[in-house]
Image: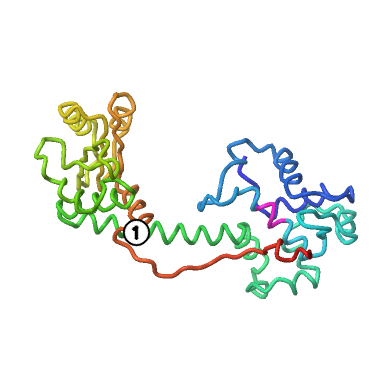
Amino acid sequence: MPIPDFQSIMLPLLTLCKDCKEHTNREVIEALAQQFAMTEQERQKRLPSGQQRVFDNRVAWARAHMKMALLLENTRRGVFCITARGKQVLAQSPDTINLRVLGQFAEYNEARSQKRTSSDAHGSSMIDKEESQTPEEQIEQAYETLRNSLAAELLAQLKSSSPSFFEKVVVDVLVRMGYGGSLKDAGQAIGRSGDEGIDGIIKEDRLGLDIIYIQAKKWDATITRPEIQKFAGALQGKRARKGIFMTTSDFSAGSIDYVSQIDSKIILIDGKQLAGLMIDYGVGVSTEIIYELKKLDYDFFVDN
């Protein structure tokens, strides 16, 4: 089953707290994961940034919204319990607890300073739709949309560039990733070998303890198995063990399967992956704006 959104977690979370005992964040997360019969894969799924698990984030926001509505309260750091109002809400045997239910409480409406759409004729449904994701998920989804758009622009630029410029981009990316020693050394390697199936060589590290052979293909068509076999053959001719094949297009299932079966270690990087690496390592892109997300520092408020 899909990971429940944070509104779907509210009622089960409040129900867990009806025993009037103190509960910890970790305790309720584990209990709710079992209640929703989540798989280990679902439990470990993280937000695109990798900083937090999706389910943990949604539980945290379900708890935060119910605290704003005074259904839950903190008793000490990381520990909370149900309030008298929370018990009253459960006593009504609700089918669900969501943002519309919480909206009946003045304290909740006052606490929420975000833009509201409740005045719209379809306000309730719009709120439910917009806030099925937590704020972090909304931010990261917007970030992913912008990143995918930028990656598409980068790939279009690469496809319209010359083969020599594309080879330069490949070297720039590899050097930014820590390969090749200096950019000067790496740049001298590209295009110098003249061997069929090999466009250049680059050091694996600054000391040159091993050599990686490179194939850079500015193609529109899918790279098929014969092209990879030719590259692998060129590696064998050099008694080489490692190679990187980068392209502006993609790879066929046969080519991907082939590299998994041979002794040589060949890494396949398609156009989308290359564009992603360019973004990650700052090749051909510049930073436009930076947003800082801050959280409460509980240690600051510890009275010694």
Question: Which of the image's four quarters has the N terminus?
Answer: top right
Q: Residue at x 67, y 63 (%)?
A: 297
Reply yes or no: does residue 8 show up in magenta. Answer: no
Please state the horizontal and vertical placement of residue 6, each as a whole percent of the image: 67, 54
Please state the horizontal and vertical placement of residue 231, each as a whole percent of the image: 19, 33
Of 198 and 227, the residue lying toward us = 198
- In which image quadrant can residue 192 be found? top left
- Label 1: which secondary element: loop
Is residue 165 left or right of 177 when viewed as pictured? left
Q: Residue at x 16, y 46 (%)?
A: 190
Is residue 62 left or right of 197 when viewed as pictured? right
Mark 1 lies on residue = 282
Q: Is residue 179 above or below residue 224?
A: below
Residue type indicated by callout 1: Gly
Q: Which span of residues is magenta-colored?
A: 58-62
Of 252 and 47, the residue lying toward us = 47
Question: Which of the image's four quarters has the C terminus?
Answer: bottom right
